Image (cartoon, rainbow, N blue to C red):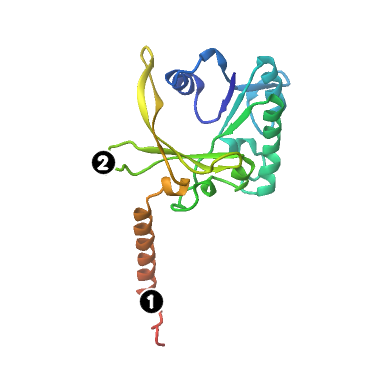
Amino acid sequence: NVLIWSGEDDPADTLLPRLIAAGAERSRCYFVKGTRIGGELESFDPARDMAALEWTAHQIGGVKLLIVDPVVSAVAGDSHKNTEVRRALQPLVDLASRLDAAALGISHFSKGGAGADPASRVVGSIAFTAVARVVLVAAKVKPEDGDDNNDRRILARGKSNIGPDAGGFEYHIDQIEALPGIRASRVTWGKAVEGTARELLTDPDDISDDAAGDTTDLLRAELTADGWTDADA
């Protein structure tokens, strides 16, 4: 059984159709929507309601996967501070251990930082990737055939403490009719690919051109500004 909490997508119109499109067994997918506090139903807060989630998991039984999306929601404090993130994620790690389940936290890349190690570009503290045993990173990449309409994406290992830490798979997104009148997206897997996540998810030529262009523009602006000094002055 799978327990899923998402603060970004609605289970009814997005998550469940996608799961059905992927071939999931609906009866084994459970969505966490809220928690009852003092008789009142409130929105589920991963940073506050982990004990209630554990009780629910035991009531369901056989939970082997716990998904938190986005994982930053499990942090009540400053998500950019290493110690606070580690402290906040530990209850999630402990819960997964007690359930003998895998915990999957989903996050996004920060803007900028192209060409850097993908695992280091996760939004917030580096502790998000440090705490995880395995980090998988996904991104849309430049098609090998040069066709910009070709939807080529890569899922690659950004880090692994329990196995190989390189390699991945190509995939693309298909739209299908999950249920009569209901369309949803699903992943279609492609070939295995070799290389590190940094190599697979970036285009060195584009990065070099962008960096060179930015540097040139910066220097030109500085050298043409009032008050600049000659090199031989």
Q: Label 1: how many residues lie within 10 Å, few (<14), some (14-19) or many (20+)?
A: few
Q: Residues within 10 Å of mark 2 (few under 14, many from 20)?
A: few
Q: Nearer the viewer, residue 104 or 217?
A: 104
The percent coordinates of residue 213 (x first, y second) are 34, 62
Quadrant containing the N terminus is: top right
Please, is residue 115 above or below residue 99 in the view?
A: below
Return the residue found at the far bottom: 233
Residue 228 is drawn in which quadrant? bottom left
| Residue behind mark 1 | 226
**Which residue is nearer to you in this view: 112 or 20?**
20
Q: Residue at x 45, y 20 (%)?
A: 13
Q: Is residue 229 above or below residue 192?
A: below
The three-letter amino acid code for the residue at tag 2 is Asp
Q: Earlier in the sequence, mark 2 or mark 1?
A: 2
Q: Position of residue 185 (x, y in %)?
A: 39, 25
Kindly report which numbered mark, 2 or 1, lies closer to the viewer in this rendering.
2
Which residue is found at the position 40% from the left and 87% from the top? 232
User: Measured from the top left, where is residue 83 in percent x and y?
Assistant: 69, 47
Q: Which mark is residue 147?
A: 2
